[in-house]
Image: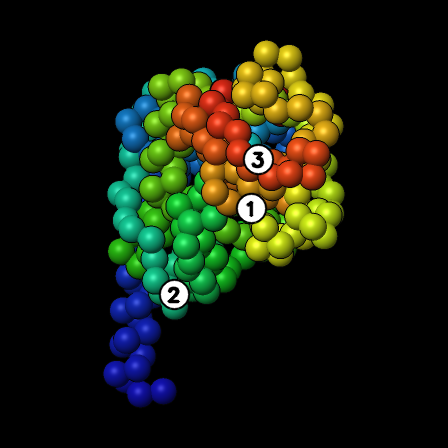
Amino acid sequence: MTVSNTGALEALSQSLVEAVESAGRSVVAVHGRHRVPSSGIVWQDGVVVTADHTLDRDENITITLPTGETVEATLAGRDSTTDLAALKITGGTPAVKSSVPKVGEIVLALGRPGKSGLSASLGVVSAVGEGWRTWSGGQIDAFVRPDLTLYPGFSGGPLVNAQGQVVGLNTSGLARSMPLTIPASTIDRVAGQLLSKGRIARGFLGVAMQPVRLPEQIKGPLGGQETGLLIVSVEPNGPAATAGLLVGDILVSLAGSPVGDPRDVQAQLGPETVGKTIEARIVRGGEPQTVNVTVGERPRGGE
């Protein structure tokens, strides 16, 4: 190896050390479960964000700051659909944030899993894609997949670029087979709602449905759509009942998008739809019909 190559590696190594030291001032340990703590990020003054799936309880949560000081934390709110939770604390240094990273960019996952102090994992961004819905209906603004190892306790910690800027929060809770990073824009949006309302508003129709194959005579007018959703129960006085939907109706599209699985409906009932009137296309008695439904807000703990 030439002297110039050695110098370049040393410079890269030193820049990564500096990035860890800089971002590490905002990385905390979150004691909200048994055994290994999770990690968290001081996102703004007095606010820590972490991965929701790492919190086994809503109370008796403490935070270990980078200084070693332990402080009490109050749960402001949590959202399982985006795997985010917001905690209120006293103290801490807010993270310096950046935009969504680029494919191939060198990044670090940081964690503070307990008394062992700050830990790091080096890798690259292997994929960046468009916004997507989680299996439970949460909206993530961009698909970010880092190619690195999330060690025990790393979920809830940041993904950091070579400048020490935080580009998102790492979690193993949104996909079983790989770590993903929740981008900063999603964290800003969700944490803002959790801090102001304590929850994320979710759209609610008040029906139970199951997938069914559509009759051959219906597929043609629907562009060849194979399946719809049979309504098997309607909640009294709910949005669907008020709109006139009945047990036995087959829902084939919602807000202009075909639906053939209950998750398709969840994807159309984000927080922005609450209180709005959307178009539901149904099949009743073998005939397509259109019904306008005003979306309600899902009761806390409801489906």
Give whichever of discs 1 and 2 has the lower sequence position.
2
Measure how far apart labels 1 and 2 are at the Cα level: 32 Å
Q: Quadrant of the C terminus?
A: top right
Going 66% across and 33% down the picture, which residue do you hit? 284
Could you tell me residue 156's position as x and y percent? 48, 40
- Give the number of the disc on residue 289: 3
Q: Secondary structure at mark 2?
A: loop
Measure how far apart labels 1 and 3 are at the Cα level: 14 Å
Number of labels in the image equals 3
Residue situated in front as seen by the camera: 147 or 93: 147
Going 27% across and 56% down the picture, which residue do you hit? 163
For label 1, the residue is 258
For badge 3, the amino acid type reads Gln
Q: Quadrant of the N terminus?
A: bottom left
Q: Are marks 1 and 3 in contact (CB under 8 Å)?
A: no
Give whichever of discs 3 and 2 has the lower sequence position.
2
For label 2, the residue is 103
Relative to 299, does residue 166 appear above or below in the rendering?
below
Q: Are marks 1 and 2 in contact (CB under 8 Å)?
A: no
Measure how far apart labels 3 and 2 are at the Cα level: 46 Å
Could you tell me residue 52's position as x and y percent? 53, 32
Going 54% across and 57% down the picture, which residue do you hit? 149
Are there few (<14), some (14-19), or many (20+) residues within 10 Å of tag 3? some
Residue situated in front as seen by the camera: 77 or 220: 220
